[in-house]
Amino acid sequence: MRNSRKNVRKKSYCFLLCMATSLLLTGCWSRIEPKKLSLTNSVLFDVLDNGEIQITKENMKPSGESAGKGGPGGEKSSADLLISRGKTLAEAVRDELNGRTLFGGFIKARLLTEDFAKSGLVPTMDFLTRDHLVDETPFLAVVKGNDPERVYASDVGLSEMVGDYIDDMADTQPNTKSESVYITTLDFIKDYFADGKQPVMGLIEIAENEPRSITNPQTGSQDPQNGSEKKYRLVYSGLAAFKDDKLAGFMDRIETRAYNFIVNELKSAVISLPDGITAAKVLKSGSKIKTEIKNGQTTIDVNIKVAFSIIQTGRAVEANQISQLKTLEQEFNKQLEAELSASIQKVQQEFKSDIFGFGTYVKIQHPNEWKDMKNNWDELFSKATVNVKVNSTITMMGETERSIRMEKQTHDS
């Protein structure tokens, strides 16, 4: 009996302790029901002629609203557009609501118009790092051209929204051709603060789809479609180069591929020779940078090693013929050296901005000299001598050891 009373007393004490502890626990004071949130997939930043900031937000439609309705990316789009303005970015974000609380936790891409990118991004970076609800993982890209609003009226392939399109491309494109860059907000901010390295971000162009022809059932001839409005598509290729926080210029897909070779970000690519019949896939690549400072002149040696697999050739090439493979390797060396050198010269002469990060190697390899060079590095970089050396190795010939031309010659003989 006495033990039973003790057990009851212990249970009572435990119950009271749990109740007292629960009073110290706090809930989510800022909780908002998901059905009352407006989920943003991407945003487009622009600056107007009067200096105001304009933001176009691509918001997801609530479930069930997108069926049977057209949208900015085509009939399957499930996005609503919300435009807001303000003197500052912080004001523009909160300028206009759509009956729901805006939530940026699902933003996948932040897009900038050329005018906005040229105006300077320091205030933008300050806002993005200061606001506790803002995420730093979305990709950054500049929309090239004079009509950036058309980005939300363009076809986005198999994706539903523009933000999804860029996020999907980031998963697939680097593994096939490496002719673009995928830079997050945090990546850009890190490069902005880095010594000897200027930032870059992705590049989007709006291309007009070629008009399709339809077959006239009466005449059988191909007649162009008339009366239909122009259709556009997004092309994510190349990069936007910056000098400090302002847009300096653009690089095309081949120049961007060269950039990825130099900064060790190239995962895969197909290199075609000028003969138009030979192509190789990059299996592996790596770059080594060596710098030298002599009599106030900086020399930068860029050494690239590439392993190739031949994926197409119309030549009489046999896998066990070392001399034939060496000839191909030399041609690929020449091709890549020309591409890389041209890209570096463009950056030196037009941008005068070290987006390759050569200055970081000078800082590591010549720390004493760097102290006097860091504040004027971009100017010194533009006058530096840059030597490019590519060493290619063909390690695979695909599924066949002999080319079709060799097989044909053997068969005919």
Image: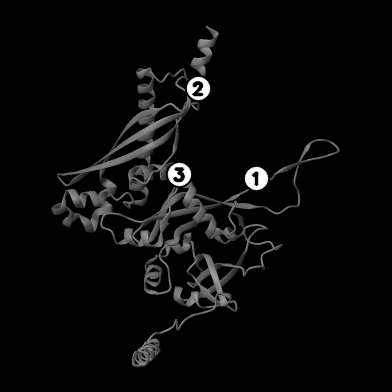
For the residues labelled 3 and 1, the Cα–Cα distance comes to 28 Å
Marks 3/2 in contact by CB < 8 Å: the verdict is no
Residue ID for mark 2: 314
Front in this rendered view, residue 78 or 199: 78
The answer to whether residue 193 is seen in the rendering is yes
Residue ID for mark 3: 175
Mark 2: secondary structure: loop
Residue ID for mark 1: 210
Left or right: 162, with 69 as reference point: left
- Against 66, residue 9 (above or below) is below
Left or right: 118, with 392 as reference point: right
Front in this rendered view, residue 28 or 357: 28
* Residue drawn at x 45%, y 54% as measured from the top left: 202
Give residue 180's position: percent from left, percent from top: 45, 48
What's the residue type where badge 2 is placed?
A: Gly
Name the mark nearer the viewer: 2 or 1.
2
Q: Residues within 10 Å of mark 3 (few under 14, many from 20)?
A: few
